[in-house]
């Protein structure tokens, strides 16, 4: 949303795309639960919408309640859910989820499967460490 307001990306630590935990959780849930629904793209879109809305709402609510931190600023937008999530953002992520599920994930799986096993293991460990580093970088300042 910062890009729309100011014309520049905001790297405040809470949203370091694609390494924000919320996005990773969303992607993992898509791959785990929607794989069987691929023949029904309309259903996949609406489930993506619902899952992303729920994840964003819960993440925002937990951060606000647990850490007194308000990371989403949707008060200026129409159709918000208690200012924790924005319907337009959920629609965008539903479309991105469909693009991920129908196009990116199969392409990445194909490319990944062509790598040697040792390289795949090192790559998984490296990406997991980077992800954990961002999770701790984001959450540690608020915990302390």
Image (cartoon, rainbow, N blue to C red):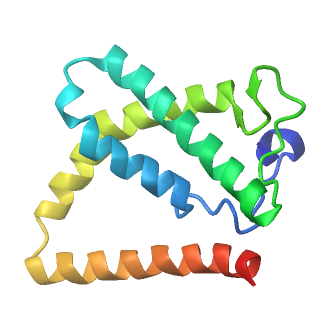
Residue at the (30%, 81%) spot, across then down: 125
Residue extending farthest front: 65
Image position, residue 20 (x, y; %): 57, 61
Image position, residue 9 (x, y; %): 76, 55
Q: Is residue 107 left or right of residue 55?
A: left
Image position, residue 87 (x, y; %): 66, 25
Residue at the (70%, 48%) spot, across then down: 61
Q: Within the image, what quadrant is residue 64 found in?
A: bottom right
Determine whether 77 is above or below 63 in the image: above
Can I make out residue 131 in this image?
yes
Query: Which quadrant does the N terminus fall into?
Result: top right
Query: Which quadrant does the C terminus fall into?
Result: bottom right
In the image shown, does 66 or 124 lie closer to the viewer? 66
Task: Please count the marks in the image.
Answer: 0
Determine whether 84 is above or below 79 in the image: below
In the image shown, does 144 or 21 lie closer to the viewer? 144
Can I make out residue 95 in this image?
no
Residue at the (83%, 27%) spot, across then down: 77
Q: Within the image, what quadrant is residue 35 found in?
A: top left
Q: Within the image, what quadrant is residue 78 found in?
A: top right
Determine whether 121 is above or below 66 in the image: below
Image position, residue 98 (x, y; %): 38, 31
């Amino acid at each position: 949303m910062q890009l729309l307001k100011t014309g520049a990306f905001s790297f405040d630590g809470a949203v370091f795309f694609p390494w924000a935990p919320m996005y990773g959780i969303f992607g993992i849930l898509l791959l785990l639960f929607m794989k069987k629904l691929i023949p029904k793209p309309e259903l996949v879109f609406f489930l993506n919408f619902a899952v992303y809305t729920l994840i964003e709402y819960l993440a925002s609510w937990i951060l606000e309640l647990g850490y007194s931190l308000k990371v989403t600023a949707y008060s200026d937008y129409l159709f918000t859910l208690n200012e924790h999530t924005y319907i337009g953002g959920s629609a965008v992520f539903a479309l991105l989820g469909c693009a991920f599920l129908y196009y990116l994930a199969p392409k990445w799986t194909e490319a990944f499967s062509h790598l040697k096993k040792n390289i795949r293991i090192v790559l998984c460990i490296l990406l997991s460490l980077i992800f954990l580093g961002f999770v701790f970088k984001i959450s540690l300042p608020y915990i302390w």
